[in-house]
Amino acid sequence: MPAERGSTRIADRVVAKIASQAAREALPAVPRMPRPNAVVAVRDRTVRVRVAVELPYPSDIGARCGAVRNRVGQRVTELVAMEVPEVAVTVERLHPPHARGAGRERVR
């Protein structure tokens, strides 16, 4: 019987790592952009996620945050079979175009 076999517990840090990777997948690939940081609160089969991201500037912030919310909710549900009623996205920093390539050019 399934109830007699035991249960599987997925550590919060594993769920946070999945959420962080999913957020990264939803964002454009920009060199030197730090990985999104995710924090989760798991209760029973429900997880609430907070993700901190940095975005390139200029950027459609609303669209990018929406993409992160959708991707994180989808991937966490797919991979750990938990309900994700809330994904809060915080934009911690905008990176201007000149900052991304800084340090590449050298003056001789």
Image: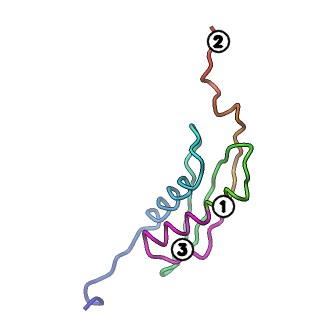
Disc assigned to residue 107: 2
Q: CA distance from mark 3 to mark 1?
A: 14 Å
x, y percentage for residue 37?
Answer: 57, 54
Secondary element under disc 3, as helix, strand or loop, is strand
Residue identifier under label 3: 47
x, y percentage for residue 64?
Answer: 67, 56
Highlighted range, magenta: 69-88
Q: CA distance from mark 1 to mark 2?
A: 39 Å
Residue identifier under label 1: 89
Amino acid at circle 3 = Val
The quadrant holding residue 94 is top right
* CA neighbours of label 3 inside 10 A, class few (<14), some (14 to 19), many (20+): many
Amino acid at circle 1 = Val
Question: Magenta span has 99?
Answer: no
Q: Nearer the viewer, residue 10 or 99?
A: 99
Where is 12 relative to 6, above or below? above
Disc assigned to residue 6: none
x, y percentage for residue 33?
Answer: 59, 42
x, y percentage for residue 54?
Answer: 65, 48
Amino acid at circle 2 = Val
Coloring basis for residues: rainbow
Question: Magenta span has 81?
Answer: yes
The quadrant holding residue 4 is bottom left
Residue for point 56% across, 37% down: 31
Residue for point 52% across, 62% down: 19
Where is 55 relative to 87, above or below? above
Question: Which quarter of the image is occupied by the N terminus?
Answer: bottom left
Q: Are marks 1 and 2 in contact (CB under 8 Å)?
A: no
Secondary element under disc 1, as helix, strand or loop, is strand
